[in-house]
Amino acid sequence: MVNLNINIPSQEKNYPIIIEHNNIEELKLKILSCVRGTKFLVVISEKVDKLYGKILGFNKSEKFVLKDGEKEKNFNNYKKIINKALQMELTRQDAIIAIGGGVVGDIAGFAASTYMRGIDFIQVPTTLLACVDSSVGGKVAIDSEHGKNLIGSFYQPKIVFINTNFLKTLDERQFKTGLGEVVKYIFIEKSCKCKEELNFTNFITENTDKILSKDLKILEQLIEICIKLKISVVEHDEQEEGLRKILNFGHTYAHAIEKITKYKKYTHGEAVVKGILFAFNLAEKRGLIDKNYKFFAEDILRKFDFKKLPDFPKEKIISAMKSDKKATSNKIIFILPVNYSLVDEFALDNEEIF
C-alpha cells in the first residue's frame, strides 16, 4: 500500500491518497470510516455498478447510478444528484462518494461542492485516467452545450482511495485512454517542480510491455509517480493561476477535437495523444525544439500503439479552441515543449498556429 498526502496551503487542507490492491470487498468499510455523519450518497458509474455493485455492498437507496459517457456530465444529471441528496436529507456532516471514472468524479464533486455550500467528497477512481489525473487536485465540473468543464469549481476531496484491482476489468480502449494522460507526464516532468527525482521517462521506456499487460505492481508504481508529479503542481498552484497550466499539455487541441466530434467519436485520452503530437509539431515549427526531440516523442507514443486520429479542418479546430476556457479574447493558449521534459505557456494568434 502507498499512502501519499497532498497539502493545499491556500485552504490549509491536507488529505491522503491511498493506492492499494487489497480486496475490493474491504473498500466499503474503509470509505465509511471517513464519513463524519450518518448518511451518504454514492454516485457510481453504471458499468462499475454492474461489475462491482454486489461486492461493494451499498444499498440501492444509497446510490445514484450514472450512465457512462461524457454526455452524462450535464445539468440534468447534476440536478438529479442534488435532488437525491435533498430527498435523503443529507446534512453538512454527511458525504457524497464518487465511484467510477472521471465523469463520475467530476459531476459528483461538483454536486458536493454546491450542496449546502459544500459537503465532504470522497473519490474512488476506477479507471486509469481517473487514477492518474481527475481524482486528484480538486477540479470538479459539468459540461454545457458550449463546451467541456465550463461550469465548475475547485473543490478538494476528503480522501482518495485508488484500488488497482478495478483496472483488471478495464477494456483495452479505456485502458489506452488512461495511458494517453499518463504519457503526458513524460513531457512535463521537469516542469512539475517535484523535489523527488522520479525519472519517469526511464520508468516508462523500461516497463512498456509490463504496463500494456496490466502488471498490477507496475501500474501501482506508475500511478504513484503520476500522482507525485500532480501533487507537486497542485501544491504550487491549486487554482491554475500559473504552474498548473502545464497539466493542459496536449489538451487545447484535444478539447477542440472532443467538441467538434460531440464527445462521441474519440475518448479523452485518444484526443490528448493527438493533441500532444500537434503540440510537438507546432513547437518544432516555431523553433522551440529540434527534430530529435520530436522523433523521440513520436517513438514513445508509437510503442503504446495509440489509436491514430485524422487531421481536422483548421477552421473548425480554431473555432473550437477559441471557446476553450483557457483562451483569451484574441489568443489561444498552448502548452508547448521547449526542451526534454520541459514545457512553457504560449498565447498564439490563429496564423501562428497553422
Image (spheres, rainbow, N blue to C red):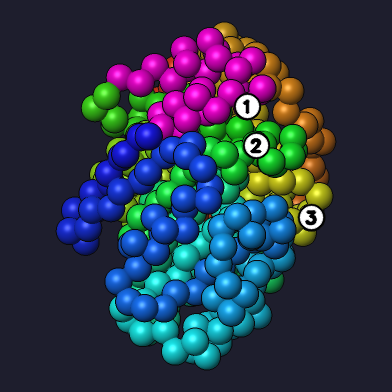
Residue 116 shows in this picture: yes
SS at badge 2: helix
Left or right relative to 164: residue 261 = right
Mark 3, residue position: 264
Q: Quadrant of the C terminus?
A: top right
Foreground of the two, 299 or 56: 56
Q: Quadrant of the N terminus?
A: top left
The residue under the point 39% across, 55% down is 30
Left or right relative to 36: residue 289 = right
Q: Position of residue 244 (x, y in %)?
A: 37, 45
Residue type at tag 3: Lys
Left or right relative to 32: residue 354 = right
Residue type at tag 2: Lys
Left or right relative to 152: residue 269 = right
Q: Earlier in the sequence, mark 3 or mark 1?
A: 1
What is the CA distance from the residue labelled 2 to the residue labelled 3?
Answer: 24 Å
Q: Position of residue 202 (x, y in %)?
A: 47, 12
Q: Are marks 3 and 1 in contact (CB under 8 Å)?
A: no
Mark 1, residue position: 214
Crowding around mark 3 (Cα neighbors within 10 Å: few <14, some 14 to 19, many 20+) is: few
Residue 216, located in which quarter of the rendered image? top right
Magenta stretch: helix, strand or loop mostly: helix
Residue type at tag 1: Lys
Mark 2 or mark 3, which is nearer to you?
Answer: 2
Mark 2, residue position: 168
Query: In this rendering, is residue 69 above or below 144?
Result: above
